[in-house]
Amino acid sequence: MNGVYRFLLTPRWLALHFAVIVALLGCLLLGWWQFGVYQDSTDRQQIRERDPAPVTELVRPGEELGEARDRQAVTTGDYLAEAQRLVPGRVHEGVLGYLVVTPLRVSDTLVVPVLRGWIADSDDPAAAVPEGEVTVTGFLLPPESADQATVRSDQQLADDEVAYVSPAQLAESADIAAATLPGGYLLLQDEQASASPAAPAVLDVDVVEPIHDISPWQNLSYWAQWWVFALAAMVFWVSAVRSGVRARRRDVSERARAHVPS
């Protein structure tokens, strides 16, 4: 190696090279991660914007939603009024109340849990179940998990209450065969019934199941920012090396002039 560049192999400079490499890789990885989040958010939003498809084409009893997650679906059936359950401790527009979950019998082998909406009081007439055949349109969403429950661990639930929205909870509480339930539920957005009693407040899908806590465009900007940081790390390293080379060439030149006879 040219003597001018030997300083790049000193411990101090090797430490700098290592730090720049770590920073560069970190920025690139974080950038790709943010881009992946942006892509996932965009893909899910596009799925939600697709036209509704029949539930029977999207889900299977006893199976996870898989690619049907976030899809708009439509189905016709009759509600199992005796199996309706309330989920306490849920806030809607700043008011504490209940979610209303009612199983919809689509066929002898398929029962779809429908999150019909929200009510303020457990005896709210809006929770009344429509009789006869209904047609429901909504979004297919994965079940909630136990850590999403909004009840105290020592709280005693009423017979018509469950801790969170889950086919498994519904099957256990309402004595519905688990094999007839899909691995998710339908968030109601529209309901067509022969009788139209007062209905629970319809919940927005982006509130119940937000795709991401921030705008996808923010993820895209973060991706660009991390790559700018990576470029900045490279510019810093190149600048530091060039400055070091110039300083050593200047020292060599000055020493050479000092040895030249007058």
Image (cartoon, rainbow, N blue to C red):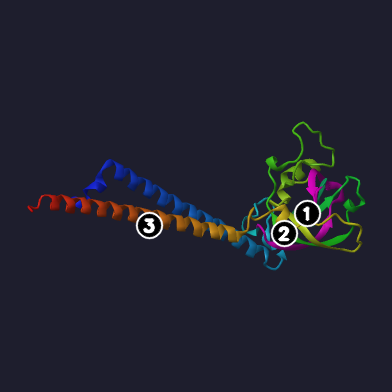
The residue drawn where x is 25% and y is 52% is 247
Look at discs 1 and 2 and give the one toward the viewer. 2
User: Cα distance, mark 3 to mark 1?
Assistant: 56 Å
Is 77 in the magenta? yes
Q: Secondary structure at mark 1?
A: strand
Q: Which residue is mark 3?
A: 235
Q: Which of the two discs, 3 and 1, labels the residue nearer the N terminus? A: 1
Q: Is 188 in front, or is 221?
A: 221
Q: Is residue 47 left or right of residue 37?
A: right
On the image, the x and y values in percent for residue 206 come to 71, 57
Q: Secondary structure at mark 2?
A: strand
Q: CA distance from mark 3 to mark 2?
A: 48 Å
Q: Residues within 10 Å of mark 1 (few under 14, many from 20)?
A: many
What residue span does the magenta drawing correspond to? 69-94
| Residue, disc 2 | 139
Look at label 1 and name its amino acid: Val
* Tag 1 residue: 114
Which label sits on residue 126? none
Q: Main secondary structure of the magenta part?
A: strand
